Every structure is written in structure tokens, then in C-alpha cells.
Amino acid sequence: MLELSTPVKYVKGVGPRIAEVLAAKSIHTVGDLLHYLPFRYEDRLNPRGIAEWRAGEMASVVAEVRNSGLFRTRRMPIFQLTVGQGRARLRCLWFNATYLQDKFQPGQMIALYGKVEEDPRSRELQIMQPQFEILVDPGDAGENGADRKAAESLEVGRIVPIYEATGRLTPRWFRRAIRTALDNLTPELPDAIPAMVRNHVALVAPRAALWNVHWPEPGESLNDLQSFRTPALIRMIFDELFFVELGLELKRREQKAQTGISFRLDDRVRAAIKKILPFHPTAAQKRVLKEIAGDMQKPYPMRRLLQGDVGSGKTIVGFEAAIIAIENGYQVALMAPTEILAQQHYFSARQILENAGYRIVLLTGSLENDRKREIRRHIAQGNAQLVIGTHALLEEKVEFAKPGLVIVDEQHRFGVMQRLKLMKKSGENQDGRVSACTTVAGVGPVTTLGEPDVLVMTATPIPRTLALTLYGDLDVSVLDELPPGRTPIVTKCVTDERSPDVWEFVRKQVKAGHQAYVVYPVIAEHEETEIKAAVKMYRELSGHTFADFKVGLLHGRLDAELKDQVMRMFQKGELQILVATTVIEVGVDVPNATVMVIEHAERFGLAQLHQLRGRIGRGAAKSYCILMTGGKVTEDGQKRLDAMTRTNDGFKIAELDLELRGPGEFFGTRQAGLPSFRVANIIRDGQLLEVAKREAAAVLAGPNAEISSEEISRALVQMRARWRHTYGLVEVG
Ligand code: ADP
Ligand code: MG
């Protein structure tokens, strides 16, 4: 008997050599093999007749081979196969497929799958480049008749699972291996999902689910199968989502169980906040501050994510939270992903907060060592109240005298792994106890002070389902309102042949007293070329096109002082046009800038374009974003550009981005801390994810009449094993 944990090499017909091929697909155990699901199904029970298909449909056809042959056209050899059902015929064509020459014999039964098209000349239907499987070979009735019959019965007269081939392992190979594994699978498959949850969600048993996803009942709807909505598939998907959410729920609870700091929020603190506000906060800013302040008053540490589209005014909310901590006698760390942004925060913090008497320091990697040492001393002695910095805060040993609040700005640029590090809970034993801040800001061991609060701010509006998985352990606040008086940004897309017109337009805007950004490509991995392009265009624009204006250049390789100087000059309006690389992507805030020209816009990712565009439209004047394309635009590239011209809404853009790139890419690799699901797909299965979250919370609310403590611990054991071995996530609890 096979267990789910049995190494896959023990499945009959697998063996060590094939096991190696499977390992490359992360299939190590029988359980892994059984989770290798068909990517589609073919209905070979009630196949539609050839004549019933229409052009444009994806057809699944079972028919008999009539004849085949290779013919050469001027451009390439084409292999043609004609199949038939009675008098009906269908032609199949493959380009460049000389390898198919000896493959088919008249009389064979084959299954085909591909797109039906109409031959423009004869108007007959044909299938281009179909996938195929030879089902029955008339000349092959040989010795192993019984075996062959059994195998055939897996391939015809039923709904047949189609697996993705890998190496020399064909879909048919998988079909047979998985069938063998199922036939020999132990009848005892314990269900780690508590009965309460099974009842709530009406889940089928694990064994039935495994059988059914591979070998659907004859009556199963092909539609439900293709959309992953049969009871068996739902069970498999829910199974994965539930244990991820259970882990996240547990983390949340553990965080709440830690000792934090109960900040006081009295009239004095309120007055201090009011005093610094340079404008009336929006209703959204007020609401969000209330949520944050509520957390800060609680006796357990805050773990809150503040989401707000570019320009929604997150910085001031961060400063307000900082004042609460500082007024309570604690220190605050504010981290930004780039030096430019850290400097800008430092700049505005001094404008807004220094008048009120708060002591602010800037700590970045590029400071001289002496200077760094001095600043670190200020921090350690508690003189510095607000510490602004880059990753330097994360990487270097910075000891805080009395850390109270950590603010992480533009979190998406930090990578989710770093966030997990940041959120990592305290060490198990008292002595080795590290605080959340220890990993984030190098704060020394905190034993008596209580865990600092953590506020994470991001402009990447994450679709709700993703937020539930990625940030399931955080509370979320949303700034869903822009400060008043903003006019929507107008976005246009043009080819770079139109650049003279574009420059003319920029000229007009600058003459009217506004400022402009011109951003150069592009691909993050090619920083060198990116800088070259910017430098070259800077020469051209400053020397010729805009010789009469003051033009600045900004890229990542400039030394910090120069960067700072350029940024400051642009901020003060001493530069009218800023030629830059994507270093200005996040956070930069110059309200007088009303034009953003992005060259080679087709090469940028959608999120990046949106972030860049977020640099303008920050004041009352109408702003314009001009996306210039050069060269060929791919289909996806076009979709990105269209999305940009269509909407300014960061949420819509994020959702489209997620769709175009898939969840893995959306946040970078697995490193991003996204669970690696085998069956679930968080875009498709958003609703199930919400159910899983709800059920996970219900489980942890037990034990009670519905759920026993044994069931809860069994679920937790399973959850820990999954987090470690299957989801590739950091350990919990
Ligand atoms: P982001 O959310 O992108 O970090 P910022 O905090 O940089 O946005 O704010 C964008 C701009 O809007 C800044 O110039 C800021 O001073 C301004 N701003 C923020 N809140 C308000 C408000 N309530 N009223 C007017 N202007 C505001
Ligand atoms: Mg910001």
C-alpha cells in the first residue's frame, strides 16, 4: 500500500530514473504525484461529431485516421492528416512537422485537441497544430491484449484527464502512473481539516477528491471541471488555502498575545499633532489615523499595513503616528527604500516637525563612517527622536534607546521577505528574545520595553485576495481618497516619431511655470544601459532641445550629495526639467511638476508606470503623462499602455497587472513570500480564500461545542508541516 508520504519511486512503473525527472517538477512523494492535476479534460465519452464544431472553437475530437502526408510549400513543409467519422472528414495541419511523417496509419483511432479554423479558400474546417494522442492501433492487438484493454479504458469512453508533459513523460504516462498510484493508495487517508470546517464548507473526503480530480465521474460537467469548480477540485483547493490561512491567523493571534506599548493619546498629544498639520487632513486620512492610533493605544504591538494610491498622502499620516510615539517618550524609525526618498522624507520632516522641536536624524548607507558613528550614538542615547533612513537601518547595528514605532515606507520595494523578517515574532526563550525591531532596525534586545509598533505603508494597491494571503497576518487600512483640488492626470500614448511635438508640449508647460520629468528606460537588470540612455538624452535635451531651460540629471550612480543637490534644486524649482532613470519611481514629491514623459514606455511594467505617473498630478494644476514608445510593442506591452491611458485608479491597475503577470511575477519570485500553491490560484479562487480565512479564524476560536482541542492540535500539526515543506513559507509559531 502506498502512503501519501511514500517516495514516488515506489510507484509501479516509476523507479529511480523517472523519479529524478519528476523531482525536477517538485514531485517527490506519492502525494505530490497525486497533486499533479490535469490542466484540462477531454470528453471522450460523448465526443461531439466533427460536423458540430465551428470555427474559433477549441475542439476535442475522437476520429479515425484516413490518410496523411507531407507536402512542401515555398516557405515550409506542412504535414497534413485527414481523419474521419463515417463520411465526415476533418483536416489537421502541422507546420514544419517532418517528424510526424511516419507516425500515423490509416485505421488508427486518435484523439485531437486544437483550434478549429476555416480554410480561407475551400471554406472547409480544419484544425491547426492540434495536440493528439493515438488511442487504438488496429495492427497492435498482440500478446498483452488484457493489459492493453485496461490501458485503453483509461483513454476512451470517458472524461479523460490531460496532463502537462514533462521531458519524455507524456500525458499518457502520467495518466497511467497516477492511476496505478491511486489503485494502490492506502484506504486510510486521515482528514486534517476539522469536521466543523468540513461541514461548513461541505467538503468531500480526501480520498474521493483525489480519485475524482483525476478520474471524474461520467456525469461530471466538463465546464465545472475546466473552471475548477467540481466538489473534488474545490476540496483540493480549499485544503491548500485553509492551512495557509490557519498559519496566518495563528501569527496574528500570537502577535496580539505579545506585550506591546500602550501609548497614551490625550489632549496634549492631540494638540501636538494638530500643531504640525500643514493642511486639513482628508476624511480618509482622519479615519486611517484613528485606526492607527487605536492600535497604538492597545497593549499589544501594532502590525498594520497602510495602503494608499500614489499621492494619497501617506507621509503625513506616518508623521502623525510618529508624534504619538515621540510625545510618549519613545523613538521612531522611518525607513525608505531609496536614498532619494529617505532624503526627501528627512527634508519634509524637518520642515514639518522640526519647528515643533522634535529632533530628527538621517542615517543612510552613503554617509561617512565618522558621521554614521556619531548619529548612531545619538540614537543609542535617545537624543534622536525620529530616525529616518534606508536599509542601512536594517542592515547595520543601530541600537535604539527606547524604540516605540517602526514605519516602513513603500513597502513593496522592500520585498516581502524583508517584511517577514520584520514581522518575525520574538524568539522563543527569554534570553534570546529579539524584538520586531531587532531585525528591522537593529535595535538591541528588548526585554522590558515591550514590542515596538510597526506600520507598513505601500502605494501598491494589492487586490484584496492577494492582501489576504500576503498580509493575512496584518491589519489593513486604506487611504481611498486623494487630497482635494487634484485634477485627474491626462495620459497619452504616442510613438517616438512624435517626439518633436512632445518636446514642444513640454516647452509650453515649462514656459507656463511648471516643471517636467523625462524618464529613460528601463529594464532594472540593465542599470548600466539605463544610465547611458539617460546621460545621452540629458546631453541632447540640455544642449539642444531645451538649451534655454535649466535641465538636471538624476540617476542611481551619482553620489549621494549630488543626488541630494539635484533633487533639492528640482524641488525648489531651480531646475525646470529633470532627466532621470527610474530612481524617481517612488515617493518623490514635487507638486509643481505637471509633465511626465516616459520614453520606451512599452518596456516598463505596469506597476512601475503607475508609480512613475504618480510623481505628477500632485498639485492643483492639470498634469500630463506622455508615454512614448520606440520600436515594437508586444501584445502585453500594448495592454499595459492601454490600461495606463484608460485609468488612473491604482487598484484597477494592480489587478490588471496581477492578471498579466500572474501572482508569482507580481511580487517577484517565491522569495516574495507568496505560498507556492499546487492547486489553488489566488486570482481564480479569491472567494474560497475568504471562506478559508473565515474558517481558520473559527477553528482558532475553539475549542467549543463544534470543535475539540484534539482536532485543533491535529490541524495545527498539519499546518506547520505544510508551511515548512509544501508552501515554502517561513515557519510560524
Ligand atoms: P504618498 O501617499 O504618495 O506618499 P504624499 O504623502 O507624498 O503621498 O502626499 C502627496 C502630496 O499631497 C504631498 O505634496 C502632500 O503634501 C500633499 N497632501 C497630503 N495630504 C494632503 C491634504 N490633506 N491636503 C492637501 N495636500 C495634501
Ligand atoms: Mg510616499
Image: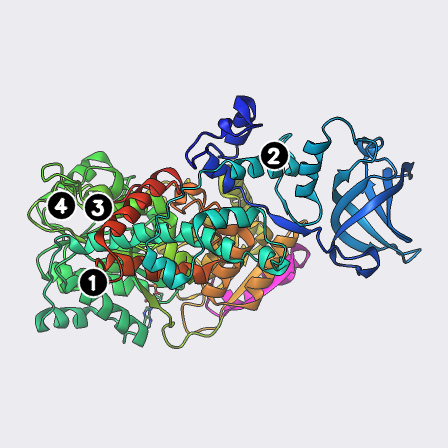
Q: Which residue is mark 2?
A: 166
Label 2 and label 3: CA atoms lie apart by 41 Å
The kind of secondary structure element at disc 2 is loop
| 394 relative position to 324: left or right | right
Q: Which residue is mark 1?
A: 321
Q: Which of the two marks, 2 or 4, is nearer to us in this view? A: 2
**Nearer the viewer's eye, disc 4 or disc 3?**
3
Does residue 587 appear anywhere in the picture? no
Residue at 55% x, 63% y is 644
Earlier residue among tags 2 and 4: 2
Calculate the distance from the C-alpha at mark 4 to the C-alpha at mark 1. 18 Å
The magenta stretch is 489-515
Secondary structure under tag 3 reads: loop
Q: Amino acid at mark 4?
A: Phe
In percent of width and height, residue 696 lies at 31, 57
Amino acid type, callout 1: Ala
| Marks 3 and 1, the one that precedes in the sequence | 1
Kind of residue at badge 3: Lys
Q: Is residue 289 above or below residue 113?
A: below
Q: Which mark is residue 400?
A: 4
Q: Is residue 474 among the parts visible in the rendering?
A: yes
- State the residue position of label 3: 425
Q: Residue furthest right?
A: 122
Residue 430 % position (x, y): 9, 40
Secondary structure, mark 1, is helix
Mark 2 vs mark 3: which is more N-terminal? Answer: 2
Q: Is mark 4 within 8 Å of ligand 2?
A: no
Answer with left or right where residue 593 lies relative to residue 707.
Answer: right
Can you give x and y, in whole percent of width and height, for residue 691 in the image? 39, 62
Category of crowding for the residue at label 2, using alpha-carbon neighbours closer than 10 angstroms: few (below 14), some (14–19), many (at least 20): some
